[in-house]
Amino acid sequence: MTETLMHPRSDAQWRHRTPRGQLLLWLFWLIVVALFVYCWNVMTARTMWVFVYDAPQAAQDLVGRMFPPRWDYMTRLWKPLWDTINIATLGTLLGIVMAVPLAFLAAQNTTPSRLLARPAALFIIVASRSINSLIWALLLVSILGPGLLAGILAIAFRSIGFIGKLLYEAIEETDPKQIEAVTATGASRAQILNYGIVPQIMPTFYGISVFRWDINIRESAILGLVGAGGIGAQLQASLNVLAWPQVTMIILVILGTVVVSEWVSAKVRHAII
């Protein structure tokens, strides 16, 4: 009797989930599978499977046409390549000029108005990040016409959201003790920004700017496909005439440029930070 009271027997078994939880889990996976099947049917409704089955042979034929690259075509790529670098660099600089004030307006500890200025700045930052640079280029080419200016502005408008978001987050994460120390000296609002906040965010600012320039090198290489200048325009021209050896050469140049920009970006960030 005593042993029974001290060690009551129980037929209950431990389970990882309750029966209700197990049922909900199976129901969740059933919905996921059904959604996948539905999306697959929607995506492949107009797929011509005869081309899909023939894709390996078509790819092999295309690769055969692309090699060897046309090496002598490089003499015609230097100027478009230089234009691409200029688009990325000038677009990044212009984006920085516009993003820095927006970042200070969006940060909670520096905005002059949380009811008007901050929501407006956040809206611009979100709008910039929501629209791809290729779409910006399409819009600007239709307004300004084809050329480098449309490409520079497209890169700038796209960079505003990226730089502004990361920078205003860095401003909000600044050490308040340093700001309080500057404030205690009777400094003005401008002096508090200059001596209490700006020195703390400068390493982050440099890193963000260089990183965005690296990204913009890649994005500016394709803006020419919609008429925004640079080496992308040369790529589009070669594609239009099916000059596959030239296309290969352009792709190799773009790849080399991206690798070099990545190396430069890493070195600069390491030196600054």
Image: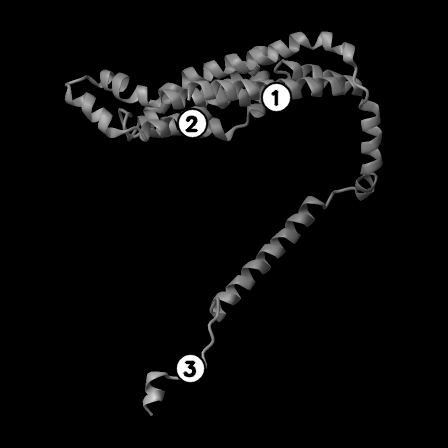
Q: Position of residue 147 (x, y in %)?
A: 61, 11
Three-letter amino acid code of the residue under disc 2: Ile
Along the line of sight, the residue nearer the viewer: 195 or 80? 195
Quarter the N terminus occupies: bottom left
- The structure residue drawn at horizontal position 48% and vertical position 29%, both measured from the top left corner, is 129
Whole-angstrom CA distance, mark 1 to mark 3, is: 67 Å
> Is 187 placed left or right of 137 in the picture?
left
Give the residue drawn at x 51%, y 66%. Answer: 22
- Which labelled disc corresponds to residue 125? 2
**Amino acid type for the residue under numbered disc 3:** Ser
Q: Is there a contact, CB below 8 Å, between mark 1 and mark 3? A: no
Q: Earlier in the sequence, mark 2 or mark 3?
A: 3
Q: CA distance from mark 2 to mark 1?
A: 29 Å
Taking the image as shown, residue 23 lies to the left or right of residue 245, namely left
Image spot of residue 2 (x, y percent): 32, 89
Q: Is residue 144 visible?
A: no
Q: Residue furthest bottom?
A: 1
Q: Which residue is mark 1?
A: 259
